[in-house]
Image (spheres, rainbow, N blue to C red):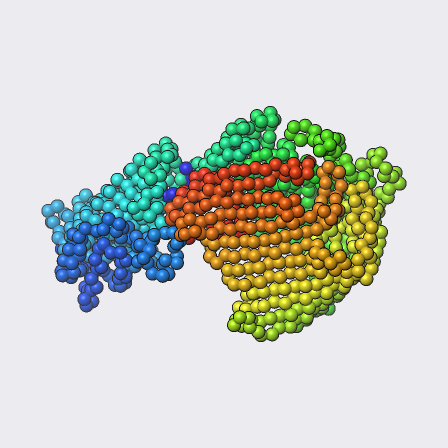
């Protein structure tokens, strides 16, 4: 099984270097240290004279090992040694796991307790010791050895160290009751309470033997700990072969606390090749409370960040439409810069679906190819998807980009889940572009098409091609800034005809009438295609200092068309329509503002308060543009920021006529470090003439001019009440009818990562929505959004938390979505159970016909292995509870 975070991340450099710690001729020495340095292919060793009395070793076992000095480790005094021996004979408590560097929570410092989750009973603390953090290359380090006594048997050429043997080289350390070196056979052996340490790794065993000439090592009855991963395990035997591959027999792995094997992996045979970065295990069993729940004859997994071929974590889910879904991803590591992933998925109601993606990463380009196929037995049709995403020229002025996706039918995303990073509610992109970036200018050539993923939307325009040039530069030292935008685009589309056809045939409204496709309702200019050229040069003079700014600017927008019409008998006079409309419209603006600040205090906190008034005058003469189509233009959403735009339309098909003044003011409360504690903005637009330029209706006609003398009041507020509380609100208030057009308020409370509370409300009146039944845009005051949203994740105790969301629609007096559940979290596993209710929207009928669904979702996460089942729960919580992703990313 290939894990992106592998279950066996054990690091055993000690085994790779432990032979060096004993690979030395040992002469008779007692109560002395030996220092050895590499000399050619052998070792040169000499006794080290102690400088004064050496510090005694701490007794073993010990809950929190005391630091030792950086001086070479000395020999314990006889009295101290006797004390150690006496301590060793005492029986350790059953729940004492200090031999694994485990420290219970109550014995941790306040800082150490804050570093672990509140539901953890303790953590592994690597003891301070000489050389633990030493990063000096090993060939530059001496080997230190000490023991209570030593002897050398001349006949057998064997050196023996006895009594609390300690061998150290830099960060590597070995301890045992006895160590012997057979010079004739180039072998070494550690016996009794063997302890091998490297930075962040502890290995315990009864005995250890090694071959000095080839590095072969064997340790019996192994326990190991990887501190950073909070992982531990056991093995009957651990061997390092002469090819540096580590082999464990009857090994286990878990991230559960000592004495609490909620889950564990067991394998008869495990091989770890750290040089190549891979591992493999045979006859693997996943046990929960010592009960086998999963078996695999073979698993292949990475030991580091290098990718490896193998199985990824499978997932299981159930839905009404698809039945039971079982997905077993398989990762293929092709080369360092190529890989692929297959996602075979069985759907009990539809059949076998296969998805896959191929990725590439080069110094100057990157991308991926994706595809999916399903022979859908539910509808007896083939469903497919394929796509290509590419970015090139990442380090040059020329760059290329491709985002192309095609699907078999507009119901693909509605019916099928996908492991691929491709999804859309309306359409998928089919776009390619090449861009050149000069010094202050840019040129881009692109083609852009769409594939609809719904049957109730208008067919969008294709851009075949689109050429754009834009840039800006200063005119010498004059202070003037000259800018320009130029574009040529050919817009085309193939309008659909007839009636909307769903998966079960032609769609009918509530009166039993067939529903026309949205394109059938388009008339006149809305059925135009053709060429468009637009050019917009600009000139501005920005001036700014630390208390004010003024920016006068002027630009012109010239647009020219060469049109064709999809003519038909619908009442529009296509024969006399203007095929080459054009317009040239100047736009002038003057933007200015002031900046004031003062020192003040709120609730005893020193703050700097600002006052930032701003005025923006905009003028553009009226020119009739009703003979110009709407290829890519829409009206910008009104808000406080839109007060200071020089056009109320997006795109190049319209330039809004204007003679207006926008007034606004912003005030901020800033802390001494620049943190924005609060911000409030308020403004309005005053119109000195009617706005006659409007967007076309679906029937090709323009609505009446907007005759209001002022806009709605626009206000925004942000208040960071504390590090835990944050409030955001905005409102649009229409003074003409003393009513509010739109607004929202959202409060977020998150005093710590595990505690999340969100409360929100939003509304918007006079919604302009496309009605699939009539093929027109409804401008009905009854069409509105009026919704509340409450979501939370809140701990009941250190291990149990409540999860919930309730989204209510006041306009229709119904619940849109509600879910609630429980989460159990421990240091080694997590369980979530969520009961969900939601509304499936019917695109053709009234809300009374919308269908409701219910479901129960289960997620089990074995920490260190990933999610065993219920991966969709993550998406549900991520979408429904703001702050959830931050909570998971910062999980302790």
Q: Is residue 284 left or right of residue 646?
A: left
Residue lying at the far right of the rendered structure: 576
Residue sitting nearer the eye, 860 or 602 = 602
State the image quarter where residue 27 is shown. Answer: bottom left
Residue 641 drawn at (x, y percent): 68, 59
Residue 49, can we see it? yes
- Look at the image and tell me in which quarter the N terminus lies: top left
Viewer-closest of 854 and 372: 854
- Residue 206 lies, with reference to residue 61, above or below; the image says above
Q: How many circles with numbers are drawn on the protein?
A: 0
Q: Residue furthest front?
A: 813
Residue 43 picture location, percent across and down: 23, 53
Residue 555 visible? The answer is no
**Spot occupied by residue 544 in the image (x, y as percentages of width and height):** 68, 69
Residue depicted at x 30% and y 52% = 102
Residue that appears at 16% across and 52% down:
89
Location of residue 816 (image quadrant):
top right
For the view shown, which residue lies furthest in the bottom direction? 599
Give the residue drawn at x 76%, y 58%.
736
Could you tell me which residue is drawn at 64 percent across and 29 percent down? Answer: 503
The image position of residue 475, as x and y in percent, is: 72, 64
Q: Camera-side residue: 185 or 60? A: 60
User: In the visual, does 178 lie left or right of 741?
Assistant: left
Residue farthest toward the left in the current orientation of the protein? 155
490 lies left or right of 266: right
């Amino acid at each position: 099984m290939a894990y992106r975070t592998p279950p066996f991340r054990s690091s055993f450099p000690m085994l790779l270097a432990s032979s060096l710690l004993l690979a030395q001729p040992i002469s008779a020495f007692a109560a002395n240290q030996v220092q050895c340095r590499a000399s050619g292919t052998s070792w040169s060793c000499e006794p080290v004279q102690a400088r004064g009395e050496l510090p005694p070793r701490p007794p073993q076992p010990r809950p929190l090992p005391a630091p030792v000095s950086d001086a070479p480790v000395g020999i314990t005094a006889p009295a101290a040694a006797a004390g150690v021996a006496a301590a060793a004979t005492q029986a350790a408590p059953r729940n004492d796991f200090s031999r694994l560097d485990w420290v219970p929570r109550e014995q941790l410092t306040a800082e150490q307790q804050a570093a672990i989750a509140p539901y953890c009973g303790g953590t592994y603390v690597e003891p301070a010791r000489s050389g633990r953090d030493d990063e000096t290359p090993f060939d530059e380090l001496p080997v230190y050895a000490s023991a209570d006594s030593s002897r050398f048997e001349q006949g057998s050429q064997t050196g023996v160290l006895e009594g609390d043997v300690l061998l150290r080289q830099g960060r590597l350390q070995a301890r045992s009751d006895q160590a012997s070196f057979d010079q004739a056979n180039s072998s070494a052996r550690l016996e009794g309470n063997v302890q091998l340490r490297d930075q962040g790794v502890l290995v315990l065993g009864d005995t250890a033997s090694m071959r000095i000439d080839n590095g072969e090592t064997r340790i019996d009855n192994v326990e190991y700990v990887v501190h950073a991963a909070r992982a531990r395990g056991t093995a009957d035997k651990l061997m390092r072969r002469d090819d540096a591959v580590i082999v464990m027999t009857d090994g286990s792995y878990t991230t559960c606390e000592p004495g609490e094997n909620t889950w564990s992996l067991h394998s008869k045979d495990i091989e770890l090749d750290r040089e190549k970065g891979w591992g493999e295990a045979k006859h693997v069993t996943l046990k929960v409370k010592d009960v086998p729940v999963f078996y695999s004859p073979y698993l292949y997994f990475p030991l580091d960040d290098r990718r490896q071929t193998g199985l990824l974590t499978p997932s299981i889910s159930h839905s009404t439409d698809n039945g039971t879904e079982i997905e077993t991803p398989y990762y293929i590591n092709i080369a360092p810069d190529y890989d692929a992933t297959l996602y075979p998925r069985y759907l009990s109601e539809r059949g076998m679906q296969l998805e896959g993606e191929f990725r590439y990463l080069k110094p100057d380009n990157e991308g991926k190819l994706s595809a999916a196929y399903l022979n859908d037995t539910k509808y007896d049709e083939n469903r497919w998807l394929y796509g290509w995403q590419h970015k090139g020229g990442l380090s040059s002025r020329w760059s290329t980009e491709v985002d192309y996706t095609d699907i078999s039918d507009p119901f693909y995303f509605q019916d099928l889940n996908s492991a691929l990073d491709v999804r859309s509610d309306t359409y998928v992109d089919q776009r390619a572009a090449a861009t050149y970036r000069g010094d202050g200018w840019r040129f881009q050539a692109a083609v852009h098409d769409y594939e609809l993923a719904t049957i109730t939307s208008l067919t969008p325009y294709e851009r075949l091609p689109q050429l754009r040039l834009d840039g800006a530069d200063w005119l010498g030292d004059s202070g003037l800034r000259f800018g320009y935008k130029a574009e040529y685009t050919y817009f085309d589309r193939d309008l659909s005809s007839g009636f909307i056809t769903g998966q079960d045939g032609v769609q009918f409204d509530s009166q039993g009438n067939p529903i026309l496709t949205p394109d059938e309702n388009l008339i006149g200019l809305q059925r135009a295609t053709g060429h468009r050229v637009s050019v917009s040069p600009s000139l501005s003079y920005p001036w700014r200092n630390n208390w004010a700014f003024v920016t006068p600017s002027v630009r012109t927008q010239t647009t020219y068309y060469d049109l064709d019409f999809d003519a038909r008998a619908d009442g529009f006079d296509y024969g006399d329509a203007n095929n080459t409309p054009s317009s040239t419209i100047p736009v002038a603006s003057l933007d200015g503002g002031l900046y004031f600040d003062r020192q003040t205090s709120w609730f005893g906190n020193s703050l700097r308060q600002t006052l930032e008034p701003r005025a923006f005058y905009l003028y553009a003469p009226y020119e009739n543009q009703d003979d110009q189509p709407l290829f890519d233009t829409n009206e910008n959403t009104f808000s406080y920021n839109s007060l200071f735009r020089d056009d109320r339309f997006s795109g190049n098909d319209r330039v809004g006529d204007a003679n207006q003044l926008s007034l606004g003011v912003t005030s901020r409360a800033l802390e001494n470090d620049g943190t924005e504690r609060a911000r409030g903005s308020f403004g309005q637009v005053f119109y000195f003439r009617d706005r006659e330029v409007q967007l076309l209706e679906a029937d090709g006609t323009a609505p009446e001019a907007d005759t209001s003398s002022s806009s709605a009041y626009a206000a925004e507020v942000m208040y960071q009440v504390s590090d835990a509380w944050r409030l955001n609100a905005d409102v649009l208030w229409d003074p003409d009818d003393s009513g509010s057009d739109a607004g929202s308020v959202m409060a977020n409370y998150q005093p710590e990562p595990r505690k999340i509370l969100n409360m929100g409300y939003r509304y918007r009146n006079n919604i302009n929505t496309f009605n699939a039944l009539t093929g027109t845009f409804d401008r009905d005051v009854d069409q509105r959004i009026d919704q509340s949203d409450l979501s939370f994740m809140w701990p009941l105790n250190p291990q149990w938390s409540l999860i919930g969301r309730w989204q209510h629609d006041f306009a229709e007096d119904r619940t849109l979505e509600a879910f609630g559940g429980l989460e159990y979290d421990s240091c080694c596993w997590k369980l979530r159970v969520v009961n969900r209710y939601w509304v499936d929207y019917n695109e053709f009928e009234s809300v009374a016909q919308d269908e409701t669904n219910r479901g129960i979702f289960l997620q089990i996460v074995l920490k260190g292995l990933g999610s065993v089942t219920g991966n969709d729960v993550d998406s549900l919580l991520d979408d429904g509870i703001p702050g959830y992703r931050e909570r998971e990313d910062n999980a302790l």
